Image: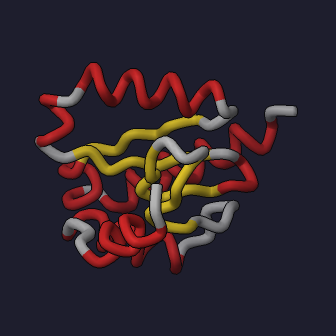
Amino acid sequence: MSEIRTQEMRHSATASEQTLWLAIRRSALGAQFRRQVPIAGMCIGDFVASEVKLVVEVDGSAHARRGIADSRRDTKLRRFGFTVLRLPVKLVERQLPVALQRIRDAVATLRLVP
């Protein structure tokens, strides 16, 4: 994944990705997140907390058609030791505190794993 593609994705983030990013930057979630991060040269994660190896993906309607591809991608990420948390767009847009709690819970759980 090239840095140019990563920059393009940062600049073309969806409204729900922007909303989550602003919240992640301000919230005490137990880990520092970066957005649109290249991972192992195979994909770009929406939001990544490298220290706990958590990838947070915001899934919109396009992901309904990409279920198999997303599943394969998640499997590859797990091989590299990452956990993938997929959040539906509607959850981010309508229940942001719930989405943030899911992220907080995932970070806490991953901190417990040796």
Q: Nearer the viewer, residue 102 or 37?
A: 37
Towards the viewer: 81 or 16 = 81
What residue is shown at x 68% (from left), y 62% (from top)? 31
| Residue 79, x across and y down, in percent | 63, 25
- Name above or below for residue 3 compared with residue 48: below
Residue found farthest to the right: 114
| Quadrant in the picture for residue 95 | bottom left
**86 left or right of 103?**
left
- Relative image position of residue 111 (x, y in whole percent): 78, 44
Residue 17 position by quadrant: bottom left
Where 47 sits versus 60, above or below?
A: below
**Front-most of 103 and 51?**
51
Residue located 26% across and 50% down the image: 91
Measuring from the top left, give residue 77's x and y in whole percent.
55, 33
Q: At 49% from the left edge and 52% from the top edge, which residue is drawn? A: 101
- Whole-percent x and y of residue 9? 32, 67
Q: Residue at x 67, y 45 (%)?
A: 53
- Quadrant containing the C terminus is top right
